[in-house]
Amino acid sequence: MADNIPENIPEQIPAPISEGVPVSVEQPAPLEASAIGEPIAPDAAPTYEQESLGSSARSIFIAIAGWAVPGLGHLFQRRIGRALAGFAAVGTMAVIGLWMRGNVFPMHSDDAFGVLGFIADAGSGIFYLLAHTIEKSGPDVSRAAGDYGTRLIATAGVLNMLFVLDALEISRGHKN
Amino acid sequence: MNLTHFQSMVLFAFIVSLGFAFLSRRRLKSRIKYLVWAFVAFLLVAITIGWIMYPASH
């Protein structure tokens, strides 16, 4: 067998081990290791980074849900009272504002007040998106009631933003 | 729908007070107390400012 080995290939002969001398045998490294150097077992608890990432994704989801449907962010976290109060408060104010034919600001506006109005109105989520379905006649700010309605719609959006922030704080554990 | 200025103000004050009460208090009793307190405060401040501005309208 030794005659078949070509001469240009060096033989890999392990170093001689002297008897009586302890030799450390290296164990093979685990295939997967966490950031702190401990192997991950299949049923191990998630690391801090994984928990943080999952918590952030959940918080973003809750914020978007709470914006889209007022109170939904709290409902996902089993805060039934706040969920109902949020939906009732934002919904009542937005719908009455629309019935009073308040102005709903569009996304694109020329002046800064129009942009601010859009931000406030859009805060009410689904009520902003369904504004033209709820009140088909459109805005009429030539009457005083229409002007009051504009304020109610904007207030509904800002109030929903407060509920979204509250849901966000709860999901991050900063608030009960 | 037609609401007067005062009716709109009462509606605004009640709903915003309701929202604040649920956001800032946890127990039902303290929520009701805060709701009443904020509602009355909204109305009193608005009516006071209205009377302060009244001479300017004449």
Image (spheres, grey):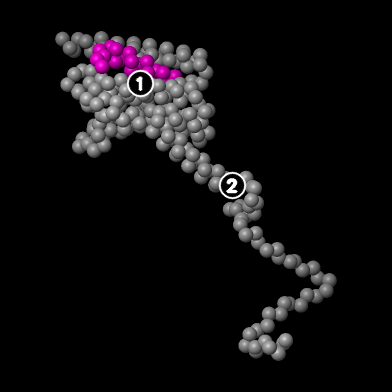
Helix, strand, or loop for circle 2? loop
Please give the label number shown on residue A47: 2
Residue A21 falls left or right of residue A84: right
- Work out whether A153 lies above or below B32: below
The answer to whether residue A73 is visible is yes
Furthest residue toward left: B58
Tell whether position B14 is magenta.
yes
Q: CA distance from mark 2 to mark 1?
A: 44 Å
Was residue A139 drawn as part of the magenta stretch in this picture?
A: no
Q: Quadrant of the N terminus of chain A?
A: bottom right
- Residue at position x 40%, y 15% in the image: B38
Picture quadrant where residue B36 is located = top left
Residue kind at label 1, given as amino acid type: Thr
- Can residue A151 be spotted in the picture? no
Q: Chain of mark 2?
A: A
Instruction: Name the quadrant containing residue B14.
Output: top left
How many residues crowd mark 2 within 10 Å: few (<14), some (14–19), many (20+)?
A: few
Of all chains, the one bearing label 1 is A
Residue A107 image point, x, y percent: 26, 37
Q: Is residue B5 above or below residue A170?
A: above
* Residue A15, horizontal then vertical, whole percent: 73, 77
- What residue occupies the far right of the structure in this picture? A20
Q: Is residue A6 left or right of residue A93?
A: right
Label 1 CA crowd tier, 10 Å (few <14, some 14–19, many 20+): some
Task: Give the residue at x 62% y 88%.
Answer: A8
A26 relative to B26 in the view: left or right: right
Q: Which residues are magenta?
A: B1-21
Prevailing secondary structure of the magenta residues: helix
| Residue indicated by mark 1 | A92
Residue toward you, B1 or B35: B1
**For residue A77, above or below residue B50:** below
